[in-house]
Image (tube, rainbow, N blue to C red):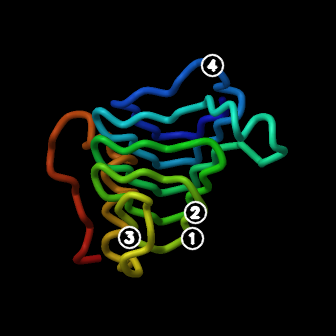
Amino acid sequence: MTKGEHVYIWGQIEPFRADIVTIGNYVVLGAGSVILTHCPISFYNGKDVSIVIGDNVYIGAGCCILPGAKIGNNVMIGAGSVVTNVIPSHVVAAGNPCRVIREITDIEARRIKLMTEQGLVANGQEPDWGMND
């Protein structure tokens, strides 16, 4: 597994094929979420099974990320979603299967980065949003 800076994992990453997982910077994997690294069908049909999570990504509680999933930068994944495909950058996505709901706002993207950068996801404090500068 390749993991960037300021990554908080409250879920689990299956150890079976952790080598297929790449996680960028400023990422939260919510409680009860799982990155599955096994799928016999995918591994034997030539499908790209690598799992890539970009920078500045918040994955809500109870999500399931499957082999072959690609999540872009500046993305919020809604709680309970099942990510099976490509989620582009700069969006809010949710559902089963996970799909784009809308574009992410600049302020939402900034909040994700600040929460992880300042370690506030871990300690429950309100971030210094710096919105007045």
Residue contact at pointers 4 and 2, CB within 8 angstroms: no
Q: Quarter-wise, where is residue 70 in the image?
A: bottom right
Q: Which quarter of the image is occupied by the C terminus?
A: bottom left
Residue contact at pointers 2 and 1, CB within 8 angstroms: yes
Position of residue 31 measured from the top left corner of the image (x, y, whole percent):
28, 34
State the residue in front, 30 or 85: 85
Type of residue at label 4?
Phe
Position of residue 126 measured from the top left corner of the image (x, y, whole percent):
15, 51
Q: Quarter-wise, where is residue 67 in the image?
A: top right
State the residue in front, 133 or 124: 124
Disc on the earlier residue, 4 or 1: 4
Question: Quick check: 37 left or right of 19?
Answer: left
Q: Which quarter of the image is occupied by the N terminus?
A: top right
- Secondary structure beneath disc 4? loop
Type of residue at label 2?
Gly
Q: Mark number for residue 16?
A: 4
**In this figure, which residue is indicated by the disc labeled 2?**
72
**In this figure, which residue is indicated by the disc labeled 3?**
92
Mark 4 or 1: the one toward you? 4
**In this figure, which residue is indicated by the disc labeled 1?**
88
State the residue in front, 57 or 66: 66
Question: Quick check: 116 left or right of 132?
Answer: right
- Secondary structure beneath disc 2? loop
Position of residue 99 measured from the top left corner of the image (x, y, whole percent):
44, 69
